[in-house]
Amino acid sequence: MTKDRTKAHKARLLLVSLSFLVMGSCRTAGEQAAVKGKLKIVFLLGQSNMVGYSAPGTAWYLTQPMYVPPPKTATARSRYYDGGYFYWQGVSYAYGSEEFNARGKALLEERRASRSRWRALVYGNFGRHPTRNDWLPEYGPAPKTGTKTMYPFLDKKAEEEGIHKRMVEHIESPENKLHPRVAFEQLSKRDDAIADDIERVRKIFLNGTEPEDFDRLAEALEAKGRDFAADRAAYAALVREHVNLPIAERTRITAFGEVAGEPTGVQKDNVTQGVLSLGYAKWATACGPEYPFGISFERMVDGPVLLVKCAWGGTSVHVPWRPPSLNNAETPIEKATREAANKAGAEEAEKGGFEFKPQQRQTGTGKCWERAMAHIQKVLGDPGKYHPDYDPKAGYELAGLVWFQGWNDMGNPAYGEQLVTFIKDFRNAVKAPELPVVCGLLGHSAWKQNTFDGHVNSGMLYAARDTDLEGTVDIVNTVKYFPLELGLEGSVKAAYGEESDEYKKAEQIINRACSKDGTHYFGSAKFLYLTGDAMARSLANLMAGGEPAIHKEAEEISRTDQ
């Protein structure tokens, strides 16, 4: 960080209560009284996990000890590879030497290639063979199309090719430092490492709520009926009445995109605004990171706060969020990847005797970028329209950007370079060259040693270490919050049977703790509140001139031998 940048950050020290950051305590109601001053504006951008699918009832899990299935769950597996089983996931999280790790990735790629090859042969006109059907009599009868017959067929072929056998050998190898039994032991102790975070979130969001209070909430919601769920304010008030989930005092939000709001005429482009509470997500009965972020952030800063949220599911920084500086340009990695793919494709076409159409350079600014910036400029042009406590004499401060995105970029090796450009272009667009930025990692890897694996997580670290950005970009490590145990229902069923008490217990807990699939962190309020609170603390730290915590954490992870 440059001296000027450091000085600029430290000038903001009066805005943040560092004692809160150190001690993790909450302010009293009196201390939360609005303080006249600049309106602090925070931008929250991303894809489906920023959109938000978390139902408030899943916060029940925060009143419970972490669910840990019996150890037998760790070794239960289906005949064929199924990533839903804890044991089979061991192919992905097994680790040892660099060579060993490469073999694990190669096995998964071999399985993928096998399935792609056989599927192409079955369909005949699949992929790059538009006029050929290469099915031969020695393959046996071709299966019927459709997932019910195709998936078993593809699994059987992978078994015949020895892929599943080699996967088991990889998992059971003495080289593997994270055998499923070892991983399961780590899983069972995960909440011990984040105990302080959990306790803080319980105090902020539940404030003495008991497990049975969630039963009363469910009864009250059922009595009100489905139509009541469309009334965001009434819904949030009822939830607060029963389980104490707070409604903001000084924070307003304007949300645009896939959000419960008023249609603007463009598909998925809804817009809404109001006091921050539940309901500024996919549905008026759900929330995304904006809710826990805003509730926690409000407790750390003085004066009014305005959140500007723009999010659409299934979007990438490669295309829909593509920044204007890459309108008609490529990053070095992007160019090299495209040229390598075209070279390989041309060679394959020449050998196979079919036509190959090379990839073209990506052009144009992304639609999400354009839509988000149009909304942001409206807000910045008239902040008083979105927050009644805005004082034109005091003005506003652009406090930061929170970025939670990446699922659709997992196969994008240029993610880091594109993210750097995105951040620079965003700062330029809002005229805030030192705007603090907080990124949320993809937490699905679940294991500490895999924290920065993959194009997205390693790309975020790349951006945080960029010479021009270093010191103003931090990353929230969501890996430690990922509730992997909520995805183990199938493993418990395989280990103990559908009629067992263990399975019924797992089913009951998981059903109460989840409101979505694993891709969306199971729609878990526990995950979301921990993540949103951590994002708020990270941004408050940057605003106060603090160093990004991620650099120290990344160094510790790289030194740790799990």
Image (tube, helix red, strand yellow):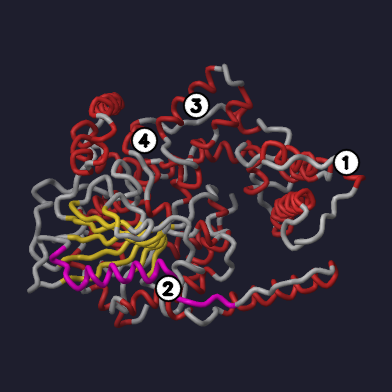
Which element is circle 2 on? helix
Q: Secondary structure at mark 3?
A: helix
Which amino acid is tagged 2? Answer: Phe
Q: Secondary structure at mark 1?
A: loop
The numbered mark, 4 or 3, whose residue comes first in the sequence reads 4
The answer for how far apart the CA atoms under marks 4 and 3 are is: 15 Å
Q: CA distance from mark 4 to mark 1?
A: 49 Å
Residue 112 in magenta? no
Residue at 32% over, 46% down: 287
| Above-or-below relation of 403 to 181 | below
Q: Say left or right for 124 vs 98.
A: right
Residue 334 x %, y %: 59, 75
Q: Residue at x 51, y 35 (%)?
A: 188
Q: Residue at x 56, y 71 (%)?
A: 414
Comes first in the chain, label 2 or label 4: 4
Closer to viewer: mark 1 or mark 2:
1
Left or right: 221 with respect to 146? left
Query: Are dots 3 and 2 in contact, CB under 8 Å?
Result: no
Residue, disc 3: 506
Q: Residue at x 72, y 41 (%)?
A: 150
Give the residue furthest to the front: 131
Give the extent of the magenta segment.
361-385
The quadrant holding residue 243 is: top left
Q: Which residue is mark 2?
A: 422
**Of callouts 3 and 2, the N-terminal one:** 2
Q: CA distance from mark 2 to mark 4?
A: 34 Å
